[in-house]
Image (cartoon, rainbow, N blue to C red):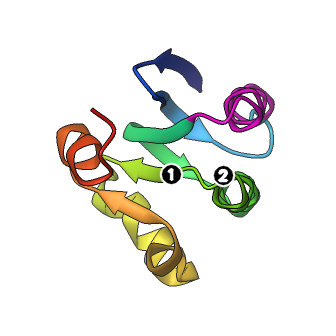
Amino acid sequence: MKVSAESKNNHTVVTVKGTLSIENISPFETLLKKYVDSDSHILINLSDLTFIDSSSLGIIVVYYTKSEKNSKHFALVNVNQDIMQMFRITGLDKRIRIFKTMDEAVQELNLN
């Protein structure tokens, strides 16, 4: 798993590549904590994510909730069909906003 973050105007794009599981979630959680605590809007780019486990879904929910409490946007972007199935099964696709492209997310959330 490789995770990186890029700060833009008023939001941060966190990109995750590879597999996201309990064995390697620490760097991902550290980045989310940093940007949630800085009151940044967060967009998570999952275009290169190949696997996600339930503990990782739980971390996403925790930081989604914290962002919501800070009145900040938290959204997932570029989710492939296999990963999207996990969000549908758990019902998270009904709670967390999911966008097909980064441009769509930035435009719809007014993050320009």
Q: Is residue 39 magenta?
A: yes
Tell me the magenta residue range.
Answer: 26-40
Task: Report how far apart the C-alphas of labels 2 and 1 lie in the structure.
Answer: 6 Å
Is the stretch drawn in magenta largely helix, strand or loop?
A: helix
Q: Quadrant of the C terminus?
A: top left
Q: Position of residue 70 (x, y in %)?
A: 70, 52
Q: Which mark is residue 73?
A: 1
Say left or right for 77 vs 57: left
**Pointers 2 and 1 in contact (C-beta within 8 Å):** yes
Which quadrant of the view contains residue 81? bottom left
- Amino acid, disc 1: His
Label 2 sits on residue: 67
Identify whether 83 is placed above or below 19: below
The structure residue drawn at horizontal position 21% and vertical position 45%, both measured from the top left corner, is: 107
Q: Position of residue 80 (x, y in %)?
A: 30, 53
Q: Position of residue 103 (x, y in %)?
A: 18, 39
- Amino acid, disc 2: Ser
The structure residue drawn at horizontal position 59% and vertical position 34%, both measured from the top left corner, is: 40
Q: Position of residue 5 (x, y in %)?
A: 53, 19
